[in-house]
Amino acid sequence: RKESSAASDVYKRQVLNSGVDGIYCSLDAATAETFQKIRGGDFNKALNGFKRLIKRKKELGLTKPSLAISYVVMQENIDELNDFVRLASELEVGVGFWSLKESNAFYGTNKELFNLNTWKREKENWTFNYKEQLLKNTPEIANEKLFEAIELARELNVSLSLIHISEPTRLGM
């Protein structure tokens, strides 16, 4: 279903004038292939929708809300961190890197529903195994990749937030 441009414009204006401080667009990937694997759906459609929101914010001359793209960092997408920072730079938005939680505390008390040690999700040609995707499985690689992405964000002047992720340090320094 295609929305009319008038209805779309009203919706964007309402979202942008809602009083929220920031809006994240959760992509979790820098490429269509990884997006399809992790999230399903059409990467370009999601990205183009967010681009239209960015454009409308500029047209309205608004400083708030801040706009950012977010990325849950996991084994499957860790190699795309720098490309994601570059994408944020091109879009002129910030980046939020999130970590998968390592305990059930975030999800409440229904341990049968959210047992993170056994939770799996079958996708088309891939099985998402929560426990296998945790960064703690390859801490040296995760640390190095995050450090590189943070440095690149500084070079490109991209605002970057780490959510549930400790600031990495260069190993051996």
Image (cartoon, rainbow, N blue to C red):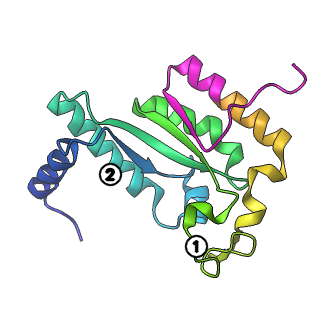
Question: In what quadrant of the picture does the N terminus appear?
Answer: bottom left
User: Magenta part of the protein: which range?
Assistant: 150-173
Pick out the residue farthest to the bottom. 112
The residue to which callout 2 is attached is: 49
Question: Quadrant of the rendered structure where residue 17 is?
Answer: top left
Query: Of 134 and 41, which appears nearest the observer?
Result: 134
- Name the residue: 28% across, 44% down: 52
First of labels 1, 2 by sequence position: 2
Q: Quadrant of the C terminus?
A: top right
> Looking at the picture, does residue 45 appear above or below residue 120?
above
Q: What amino acid is at disc 2?
A: Gly
- In the rendered image, the vertical position of residue 130 relative to residue 122, given as above or below: above
Residue on which disc 1 sits: 109
Q: How many marks?
A: 2
Callout 1 secondary element: loop
Point out residue 95 in the picture as x, y percentages from the top left corner: 50, 36
Give the CA distance from mark 1 to mark 2: 35 Å
Q: Is residue 20 above or below residue 116?
A: above
**Could you tell me residue 166's position as x and y percent?**
68, 36
Residue at 50% x, 52% y is 27
Image point (56%, 34%), residue name: 85
Q: Nearer the viewer, mark 1 or mark 2?
A: 1
SS of the residue under disc 2? helix
In which quarter of the view is residue 167 placed?
top right
Where residue 158 sits in the image (x, y, percent)?
Answer: 50, 25
Q: Amino acid at mark 1?
A: Thr
Verify whether residue 99 appears in magenta. no
Decide: few, some or many residues near mark 1? Use Cα within 10 Å; few <14, some 14-19, many ≥20.
Answer: few
Q: Indicate whether residue 161 is drawn in magenta.
A: yes
Across and down, in percent, residue 137 comes to 83, 53
